[in-house]
Amino acid sequence: MPESMPLIHISFYRFVALPDPEGMAALLRELVAPLTGNVLVAQEGISGALAGSLAQIKAFEHAMAHDPRLGGLFTDMPFKRSTCNTPPFWKVKVRVKPEIVALGLDGVTGLVPDRASGHHLSPQQWRDLIARDDVVVLDNRNSFEYRLGRFKNAIDPHVDNFRDFPDYVAGHAEQWKAEGKKVAMYCTGGIRCEKTSAWMQQFGLDIYQLDGGIMNYFQALPDADKDWQGECFVFDNRVAVDTHLQETDTTSDDVYNPDIPDERWRLERAHRLSAFTPKVYREPTDDAPEAASGRDEPAS
């Protein structure tokens, strides 16, 4: 790929019942072959983050919508795009897991959330909602993501691992209800909120989620910085983007606190990966060292 051609990053997810995850993964491995990145497949659906040239990305998106072997399951699946200076990934992986979002709760694993049962807000509707006084703005991400950037007045649930989030909600649900609060929840691309909002229905909360997550908010609103403070962490080698979806100069040392055990191992891994990551994209050669495909699981 010529150096002047931009590298495009896309993220996507779709909750849909997949009775044969292994078969779906085999097909996806064929479709993602020209790209780099990560795709997770489970009985509850797929989640992915990929990078390639614009032509390669368009070809993949077209295949997901029109390949007859997919049975129309992903025809209208949205893709969130951004350009890159740093290659987000060096190779591509398609893996089968029990969940595409590891909530780890009894009765939730493998359960496909019913999108029709939730309140999905457009970026403008979200902006209007979080300006109200009767709303709890809940950040559904890890604490290191929250520290780097967040919506104004958002609460940090102090999550070191996504599995910690349910405990926080369970411990505060009754208080929120007693105070008559609506819960406005957001995450990077929408997938974590999709999964947890279905589980949170049991508490009788009035729950709203930002459709498409932070990435969609940045993409839709040129003045997103009116509501957003800081940058947004992304789960790949770029580390962070600003409200215009442009890669920033933030490094892993700026993100992770080495005094926190869960963050220390993330920082050590990021340092290992950075040895293989050039700052300007060039087409990998056969003798290039093989680096890991990203800093974390995809978080669409």
Image (cartoon, rainbow, N blue to C red):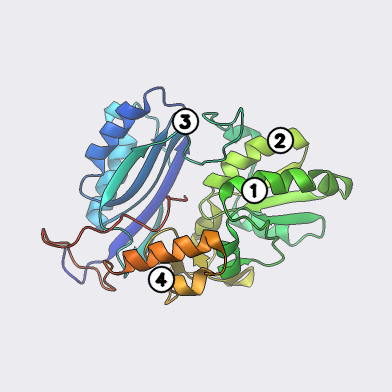
Which residue matches tag 3? 16
Image location (x, y in percent) of residue 295: 39, 58
At 76% across and 37% down in the image, what residue appears?
203
Quarter of the view holding residue 64: top left
Looking at the image, residue 160 lies above or below residue 18 = below
Does any portion of residue 92 appear in the rendered image? yes
Residue furthest out toward the left: 286
Give me the C-alpha separation between circle 2 and circle 4.
Answer: 36 Å
Quadrant of the image containing the N terminus: bottom left
Mark 3 → mark 1, Cα distance in angstroms: 23 Å
Q: CA distance from mark 4 to mark 1?
A: 28 Å
Residue that label 1 marks: 165
Circle nearer the N terminus (3, 4): 3
Q: Which residue is mark 2?
A: 201
For disc 4, the marked residue is 247
CB contact under 8 Å: marks 1 and 2: no
